[in-house]
Amino acid sequence: MRREEFLENIRHRTRYGRYKPTKAPDASWTPGRRAAAREIGDPAARFLEELEALGGHGRRVGGLEEARDYVVGLARSSGARLLVRWDVEELERLGADGPLREAGVEVAVWRELEDFREVAGRADIGLSTAEWAIAETGSLVLESGPGKGRAVAILPPTYVAVVPVERLVRTVSEAIRMYAKRNSLPQNLCFHTGPSRSGDIEQSLATGVHGPGEVHVLLVD
């Protein structure tokens, strides 16, 4: 690539309003964009559209049974041997542990682990919930805490989040306002947007280098 083309590529990708990897607006992270919320008539459909534009996989399911079948089916089809999950009540209610073990998949529950990162690093699938799902950008908001290790969403090559549809918010600023209303922040708060993607100076894009290369989000009615 010639020097002029290379520099124009950089200008194009950094110029306001020019480069959008999804349909999300350039100013998603700027507060005060309440008009954007009114433009999102169906938050679930918009979330799935944005997630898929990023290379993720999303589905709206009719209940926990359908979500459980999806997780077990994914583990089977991918040949997974080990799944690590958060130790939270919602995933207990999902009831996937038994069917997964019957399918030959070992299930490691976060709170029970002695070496969290070592087990998560060997896992084929990480399974968690999310505090919020953001329609505007296809992002998940994850809070860490007891039983909710960050490594579950970062180290396994495949990550699955099971999120109740009532936790959908329309915009990034709306998610941030949720914490402003609480007047407190968790110790650790992360925004996860699609599969991990890393680009080098020559604009070559690699997937799954610094996080999961495959992301699945189930919105549960």
Image (cartoon, helix red, strand yellow):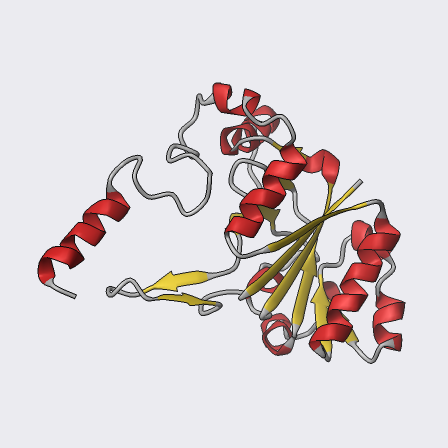
Above or below residue 53? Residue 110 is below
- Residue that lies at the very extreme toward the left in this rendered image: 3
The answer to whether residue 88 is visible is yes
Q: Nearer the viewer, residue 193 or 111?
A: 193
Residue 127 placement, left or right of 49: right
Above or below residue 32? Residue 105 is below
Residue 123 placement, left or right of 107: left
Q: Residue 79 occupies which quadrant of the picture?
A: bottom right
Q: Residue 26 occupies which quadrant of the picture?
A: top left
Q: Nearer the viewer, residue 79 or 30?
A: 79
The answer to whether residue 188 is visible is no
At 80% from the left and 67% from the top, the residue drawn is: 72
The percent coordinates of residue 86 (x first, y second) are 71, 59
At 67% from the left and 59% from the top, the residue drawn is: 160
The percent coordinates of residue 190 (x first, y second) are 52, 48
The percent coordinates of residue 60 (x first, y second) are 74, 45
Residue 177 placement, left or right of 30: right
Q: Quadrant of the C terminus?
A: top right
At 45% from the left and 44% from the top, the residue drawn is: 22
Q: Nearer the viewer, residue 125 or 217?
A: 217
The percent coordinates of residue 1 (x first, y second) are 16, 66
Above or below residue 37? Residue 47 is below
Above or below residue 3? Residue 51 is above
